Amino acid sequence: MNIQIRGINIALEDRGAGLPLLFIHGYPLNRHIWDPQIEVLADAARVIAHDLRGHGDSSASTGPHSMELLADDCQALLEALGVTAPVVLCGLSMGGYVTFAFFRKYPEKVAGLILAATRAGEDSPEGKANRDKAAEMARQGGAGAIAESMLPKMLSPKSYVERPELVQRVSEIMQSTSLNGILGDLVGMKSRPDSTPTLRQIDRPTMILHGSDDQLIPLSEAKVMQKAIPLARLQIIPDAGHLLNMEQPQLFNAVVREFLGEIQK
Ligand code: MLT
């Protein structure tokens, strides 16, 4: 379905009933990374997964996508869908950065956090320079060039070699991101604030999920978050890389299902 918010057409899935669970995808991805979760978890929650502006089937805008802007989009979307109860946010990678921004802006609207393949810190100087290089690559070669350069790192080395259909699916998802979406994300991520001080303030149940073979964000980042967030637990998903929910959906879904059950107790 589609919904208009803040002058943007947002494409989304909305299944099930009860506790709202909002999935927030990473860069340069879209809601279809959550296909292995949406139907399966719809008997445990009201599952909502949208394409961030500039991604997938949502319309694009020009200018930076600050994490706060993307968090405001999430809040506007929930409002438009009539969601009034606090939500469980499940953010993957850049979606995790958006989750931190959402928590800072709307803490009373958060029932719990699922932080997947993400980190709290800001970009290093080298990381910021790499954002500029990626933006130049996107201007020259579009989403195809970005997909080609990132694809080998999105999955575990094992999945990359042994699962060509999954590799193809991830490639299609990445290539569907608009140029404005890519550029907006890159500037937004480059200028995002350090969320480390936020970690101690997170007073909601928190599940951290990380692939054992994540090549984009090291497992050590998940451990830092677990130590600092008072109510956090960490589940390491074996034989999974950055897109752990696509690579190991059964394990991922089992952890999320149990976590949702605990929140509703
Ligand atoms: C993502 O998957 O969202 C990105 O790799 C995150 C990042 O580049 O920092």
Image: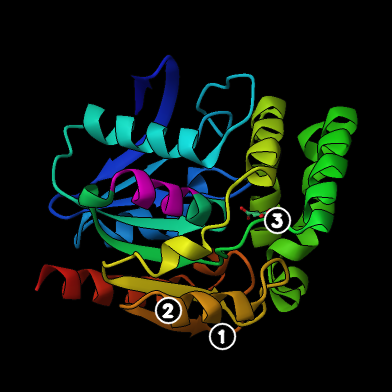
- Left or right: 28 with respect to 124? left
Q: Position of residue 252 (x, y in %)?
A: 42, 73
The image shows residue 241 at horizontal and vertical percentages of 64, 72
> Disc 3 or 1, which lies upstream in sequence?
3
Q: Which part of the image, by quadrant, shows the N terminus?
A: top left
- Where is residue 262? Give x, y as percent: 18, 76
Dominant SS of magenta comes to helix
Residue name at image x 50 percent, y 27 percent: 58
State the mark number for residue 123: 3
Task: For label 1, count other residues whose C-alpha is less than 10 Å away and answer few (under 14), some (14-19) or many (20+).
Answer: some
Q: For the C terminus, which image quadrant? A: bottom left
Residue where numbered disc 2 is placed? 251
Q: Quadrant of ligand 1?
A: bottom right
- Indicate yes or no whether the magenta region holds residue 100: yes
| Residue 166 appearing in the image | yes
The outermost residue toward the top is 7
Whether label 2 touches label 1, CB < 8 Å: yes
- Secondary structure beneath dot 2 equals helix
Gap between marks 2 and 3, in whole Å?
30 Å
For residue 196, side relative to residue 214 (left or right): left
The boundaries of the magenta stretch are 98-106
Q: Is mark 2 within 8 Å of ligand 1?
A: no
Circle 1 residue: 238
Residue appearing at x 34%, y 55% in the figure: 89
Q: Residue at x 35, y 54 (%)?
A: 38
